[in-house]
Image (cartoon, rainbow, N blue to C red):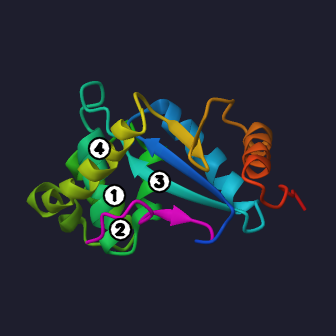
Amino acid sequence: MSIGPFRHSRGPADAPIVVVEYADFQCPYCARAAPVLREFAETSQGQVRLVFRHFPVFDIHPYALTAALAAEAAGVQGGFWGMHDLLCARQVRLADRFLHAYAASLGLDGDLVIGDAAQPFGDAVEADYARGIEQGVRGTPTIFINGEPYRGRMEIAPLRKAASLSLRRNRRAPWSRG
């Protein structure tokens, strides 16, 4: 199992814009950000790579850690993004029985995403969390664009503007909406 920092990403590995999101599957703000970030990456004409990292705020969200473990376990079965999308959409139902059902609905083995079977994925979640702490993450969602904290609105236009500014600062080709 990989715990590399780019293991869960959408978009080309060589995209000039790398958007890193630290998120908690039980955070309502993360649930609202997820489709915006997905659209941003998907409509970027290959210019954006979206990277997901776990930052379960377990002292506030009691199911955040088990949801993160389930997503990691689903990832080993080739279903990380499908599970990610279900967890974001159904975050009020994150008990084991729901996680099992979500996995099954994706054609995955539900028994492998809960309980003892999911525990080995704690190292990957912990690595993301520790990386977030090192980068100054204090809450979710926290977004970085090419390594720089993004503090704007979670909308496509401000994300594009921030990405364009980042490219200019790094002397790369200008952002293009096409």
Q: Which mark is residue 75?
A: 2
Give SS at disc 3. strand
- Between disc 3 and disc 1, the foreground one is 3
**Can you identify the residue that label 4 sits on?**
130
Give SS at disc 4. helix
Q: Are marks 2 and 1 in contact (CB under 8 Å)?
A: yes
The residue carrying pointer 2 sits among few (fewer than 14), some (14 to 19) or many (20 or more) residues within 10 Å by Cα, namely many
**Can you identify the residue that label 3 sits on?**
52
The residue under label 4 is which amino acid type? Ala
Residue shown at 36%/39% (left/top)? 134
Q: Which residues are magenta?
A: 1-12
- Between disc 1 and disc 4, the foreground one is 4
The residue under label 1 is which amino acid type? Ala
- Between disc 2 and disc 3, the foreground one is 3
Give SS at disc 2. helix
User: Is residue 50 rendered to the left or right of residue 15?
Assistant: left
Q: Are marks 2 and 3 in contact (CB under 8 Å)?
A: no
**Can you identify the residue that label 1 sits on?**
71
Residue shown at 15%/61% (left/top)? 120
CA gap between label 2 and label 3 equals 12 Å
Q: Are marks 3 and 1 in contact (CB under 8 Å)?
A: no
